[in-house]
């Protein structure tokens, strides 16, 4: 397994993605630190890429480690085995985190996350209704190139009040964990999916609100973590494993995303791991 930790100035992504990130940094006074990662740029099995995002956040992405995973039957393009995507925007006042996990092609996850990244790198969501409005603007009117559909989880966190809210479609997870707080999933997961060209699929995400305390760590991730043994959560990473890794890392975001992704790639308690794509974000409250 190869672990790569990159600085924001050396993202290791495509020229197109670098241009998008550079342009957003120039355009937006809100986006003091931001990161957009698209799975198509991370196709190599057994490799984990992790990135610090300012002083308080970090992200990791990996295609997985099992080339023969049963998840392969849901891949549309053999040249794009990683269909996950993530976005991080972290400012002095607020932070935004989003992950998406597509199948039947990366089109929906990549398109929706990239569009959300463009929007909230310029405009801060003020409440759940405002975030709903942002979701409505994500739709693409062009006919899809593939049958791609995706989970989509977006979280906004106010650093001053230590309160936040989010919208969830599908089975990606948002967890708050800390020295005095067990690792519990905040959002309500389901088996729905969003389509990049279908406004209706983006119209009814599940909303949630939360609070965090000093020392807590906010974690947003796709099911390549808690279903690292493909579609078998009971033999994959458990909340207690997440809590142990976060505590062992001193609730440091970069160390946490690196160690948690590394564990997902090898599996737990003798069970298979690395059988699905991984997108993971951690941020200090």
Image (tube, rainbow, N blue to C red):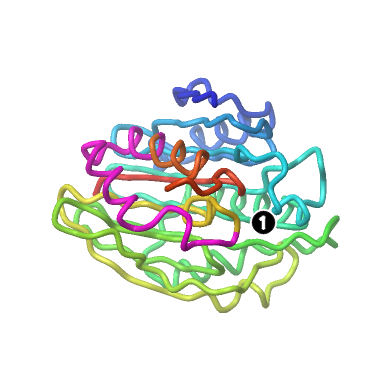
Q: Position of residue 161 (x, y in %)?
A: 19, 59
> In the image shown, does 78 or 231 lie closer to the viewer?
231
Quadrant of the image occupied by residue 12: top right
Q: Farthest residue in the front direction?
A: 270
Q: Does the magenta stretch include residue 255?
A: yes
Q: Position of residue 280 (x, y in %)?
A: 46, 46
Quadrant of the image occupied by residue 58: top left
Quadrant that contains the N terminus: top right
Residue at 84% x, 57% y: name it: 146
Q: Is residue 65 above or below residue 157?
A: above
Residue at 42% x, 41% y: name it: 31
Q: Mark 1 points at which residue?
A: 102
Please report the bounds of the magenta region as a residue range: 231-258
Q: Position of residue 195 (x, y in %)?
A: 71, 66
Residue at 67% x, 77% y: name it: 200
Left or right of 101 on screen, residue 189: left
Residue at 78% x, 55% y: name it: 73
The majority secondary structure of the magenta stretch comes to: helix
> In the image shown, does 254 or 21 lie closer to the viewer?
254
Left or right of 29 on screen, residue 19: right
């Amino acid at each position: 397994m190869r672990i790569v930790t990159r600085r924001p100035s050396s993202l290791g992504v495509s020229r197109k993605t670098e241009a998008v990130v550079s342009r957003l940094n120039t355009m937006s006074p809100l986006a003091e630190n931001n990161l957009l990662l698209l799975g198509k740029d991370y196709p190599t099995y057994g490799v984990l890429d992790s990135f610090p995002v300012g002083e308080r956040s970090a992200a990791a992405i990996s295609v997985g480690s099992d080339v023969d995973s049963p998840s392969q039957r849901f891949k549309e393009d053999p040249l794009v085995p990683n269909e996950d995507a993530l976005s991080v925007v972290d400012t002095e006042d607020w932070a935004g985190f989003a992950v998406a996990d597509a199948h039947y092609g990366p089109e929906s996850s990549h398109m929706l996350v990239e569009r959300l990244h463009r929007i909230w790198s310029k405009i801060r969501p003020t409440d759940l209704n405002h975030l709903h409005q942002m979701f409505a603007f994500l739709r693409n009117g062009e006919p899809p190139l593939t049958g791609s559909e995706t989970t989509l989880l977006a979280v906004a966190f106010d650093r001053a009040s230590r309160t936040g809210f989010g919208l969830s479609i599908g089975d990606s997870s948002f967890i708050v964990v800390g020295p005095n707080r067990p690792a519990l999933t905040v959002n309500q997961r389901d088996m729905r999916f969003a389509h990049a060209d279908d406004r209706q699929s983006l119209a009814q995400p599940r909303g949630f609100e939360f609070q965090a305390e000093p020392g807590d760590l906010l974690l947003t991730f796709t099911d390549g973590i808690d279903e690292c043994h493909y579609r078998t959560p009971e033999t994959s990473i458990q909340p207690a494993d997440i809590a142990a890794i976060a505590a062992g890392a001193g609730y440091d975001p970069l160390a946490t995303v690196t160690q948690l992704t590394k564990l997902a790639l090898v599996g737990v308690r003798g069970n298979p791991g690395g059988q699905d794509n991984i997108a993971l974000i951690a941020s200090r409250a």
